[in-house]
Every structure is written in structure tokens, then in C-alpha cells.
Image: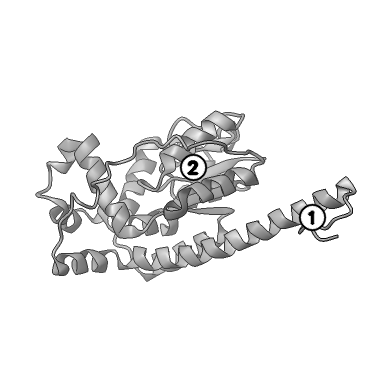
Amino acid sequence: MGRILFVHIPRTGGSTVEKLMRRRLPGSFSSSYAEGAFAGKGPRWLGQYDYYVGHNFYFSRALLDPAFVFTFVREPLDRLYSLWAFLNEQKSERAAEYEGFMDCVRRNPHFSNHQTRFLGARYELGGAKERVLAGEMTRRELRRQIGVLRRAPVGRVDLEAAQSALWEMDFLGIFEDFENSVVSLFEMWGVTIDGPLPRERVSAGWSRDLVHLSDSERAEVEERNAVDIEVYGLALRRYEEQQLRLTAERAERRRGWWRRSGNPKQADGRP
């Protein structure tokens, strides 16, 4: 199967996907976020794992090439509501730093356009890639520079880079079609998923109810996340194309099985 890199964007169902991977796939998993774990190690260390999981940026692909790379994305405002609910449930001390959802959105640039950051952040960083591969960059230094990317404003260049990443992905999952996405992903790895998914870190159903926005506040949130909203629209189109292709591939495999079995009927049941 080769190496697999999971670009795990927070609050997109990634903990469930990672748990399923650990249950169903043989091999070794990285114990930390790929970018931070890479620092100070060099190329020999990079080859010791089969799966690189955690909240990795897409540019980790450059460090692991070749690798099977995938991600899941989510409708941006729904993801924000879920993140706010998660902070209140699991990290209340962080939520207490803000006077409600809107204060967090306004004061925390890391909160908005988060999916575009993970997909479109550029791994330039003054030659950091070469230094990481040579084992010359410390973990602390690399994580500090990645922190700059997490906080930097998101613009048109990031949107274009995120669009390229979506089309380069070996697989793209959509949170709003989560079960079908997971089944399709594991099917590509030759693994059948039966039964209910072991959902992890699911915020309570009141994620949206926790956030009461006026029309003007909602418009402000949408404006602050305009790039993510555009990226999500691109992702939906990419996902639809992907699913059509996978459906056609399934049909072709079924036809091949019928031909190999010597059954006189066609795959569609006709004589």
C-alpha cells in the first residue's frame, strides 16, 4: 500500500477515521503530528512509519513523497460551531478566554479559514524543507515557524494553493457524507467496513444551538470565512467527481468478476 499521510483538519471526523485506521490497517503509526515529529530526524527516520496521522498540513506531502494523501473537509460554519462546542466541552479554560463565540471569531485569527490553512499553507519557510530532510531543524524551531503559518492571514494565494491540493489528493472525504466517504476510502485500501462507525470526539447535538447569531453577526462570520466557504464549494465538486469515478470503477470490477466466473449473464443481469 505504501505510506499514507492523513491531513487531519480538526472537527472533520478525523479522530474516527484515525481510530478505524489503527484498528483495520497493519503497520506502524507516527506518534505525533508529522511536521513536528519530522524535525531533527532526517530522511531515514521519515521512512520508518507506514501511516502519518495528526493535524498535519498538506505540505507534509513534500517530505513524504511518494505517499497516499487524503483529507476530510466540512461545511465551514458548521465546523466552527462544532469547534466552539468542543472547546466548551473539552477545553473550557480556552473557551473562557473569550466572551462567547463571536469574541473568539474576532480575536482569534487561527479560528477562521482553518481548512484553507491546512490545505493551502505554503512550505517555504526559508528553506525549511531542505533543513528538515537533512535533520538540521529542531522540533521547537519548526513548530514555531508552523505556528506563524497557523496565524497568518489567508488570501488569494492560499485559496489557489488549497484548490490545487484538493485536486492532487488521492482521496477527499466530506463530513456531510461521512459514512459513504469512510467506506469509499477503506475500499480503496481493500478493507471492508461493516457495522456502525466508532464515532470519536463527537460534540453534543446542540453545537448549533450553542451559538445564537444575529443576521449581521452571521454575515460577519461568513465574511471572515469567505475563503473557506469558497474552498468548500470546490471540495464538493471534487468529491462528486471522485465518487462518480469510484462508482464506475466498482461497476467495472463487478463486470470483470462476472466475466471471470463464466456466468452467461451480463453484470446488469441481462442474458
Q: Residue at x 23, y 41 (%)?
A: 87
Q: Give neighbour class at mark 2: few <14, some 14-19, many 20+ (Cα, 10 Å).
A: many
Where 156 falls versus 36 (above or below)? Answer: below
Q: Give SS at disc 2.
A: helix
Quadrant that contains the C terminus: bottom right
Residue 132 circle label: 2
- The residue lying at 59 percent from left, 43 percent from top is 186
Q: How is the image coloured?
A: one colour
Q: Quadrant of the N terminus?
A: top right
Q: Is residue 33 left or right of residue 144?
A: right
Whether residue 124 is visible: no
Which of 261/27 is in front? 261
x and y percent of residue 216 in the render?
A: 14, 69
Q: Is residue 211 left or right of residue 243?
A: left
Q: Nearer the viewer, residue 205 or 267?
A: 267
CA neighbours of label 1 inside 10 A, class few (<14), some (14 to 19), many (20+):
some
Q: Between disc 1 and disc 2, whose residue precedes? A: 2
Q: Tell me if residue 216 can be seen.
A: yes
Q: Position of residue 270 (x, y in %)?
A: 81, 61
**From the viewer's perspective, is residue 226 above or below residue 38?**
below
Label 1 to label 2: alpha-carbon separation? 47 Å
Camera-nearest residue between 163 and 264: 264
Residue sitting at the far left: 99
Which residue is painted at 48% across and 40% down in the image? 17
For numbered disc 1, what is the local secondary structure? helix
Establish if 137 lies above or below 57. Answer: above
Q: What residue did someone put label 1 on?
A: 255
Q: What residue type is disc 2 on?
A: Val
Q: Is residue 38 left or right of residue 49?
A: left
- Mark 1 or 2: the one toward you: 1
Q: Which amino acid is tagged 1?
A: Arg
